[in-house]
Amino acid sequence: MTQRNFKRKGSHKGIACRKGEPIFWDELKERINLSLTSTAIANLSQIADSENLTRSEALERILRGMLQVNPPT
């Protein structure tokens, strides 16, 4: 498994982050724990990187139907 370089994405540039206040959505995000295979993690990382998003935000947009993904080849 490769190590992912975490960096702060500029996805909400100009919008102040305040704990307990939503930024993009009309509700707060809740922390959960997922178990994924290394292949699924690599695919999610690739999707997030290509959209300049965090993995969390990429998954959020996929599940809300805002980001369409093609099956891996």
Image (cartoon, rainbow, N blue to C red):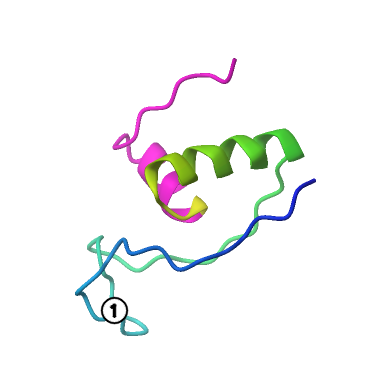
Q: Nearer the viewer, residue 35 or 15?
A: 15
Drawn side of residue 31 relative to residue 24, left or right: right
Report how many numbered discs are placed on residues in the image.
1
Determine whether, in the image, residue 29 is placed left or right of residue 27. right
The 10 Å Cα crowd at callout 1, few under 14, some 14 to 19, many 20 or more, is: few
The residue at the point 66 percent across, 35 percent down is 40
| Residue 21 left/right relative to 63 | left
Image x and y of residue 65, in percent: 32, 34
Q: Residue furthest right?
A: 1
In the rendered image, residue 20 lying in the magenta stretch gets the answer no
Give SS at disc 1. loop
Quadrant in the picture for residue 62: top left
**Amino acid type, mark 1:** Glu
Give the answer, above or below, for where 6 lies relative to 39. Answer: below
Q: Quadrant of residue 27?
A: bottom left
Tell me where the magenta segment starts and ends, as one range. Answer: 56-73
**Residue farthest top in this picture:** 73
Quarter the C terminus occupies:
top right
Image quarter of residue 63: top left
- For image coordinates 26% across by 69% down, the residue present is 23
- Left or right, 19 with reference to 55: left
Residue to which mark 1 is pinned: 21
- In the image, residue 60 lies at what x, y percent? 41, 48
> Which residue is pictured at 41% across the width and 53% down the height?
57
Residue 33, placed above or below residue 73: below
Percent x, y of residue 22? 28, 71
Q: Kindly identify the residue that appears in the image at 25 percent across and 60 percent down.
A: 25
Is 60 in the magenta?
A: yes
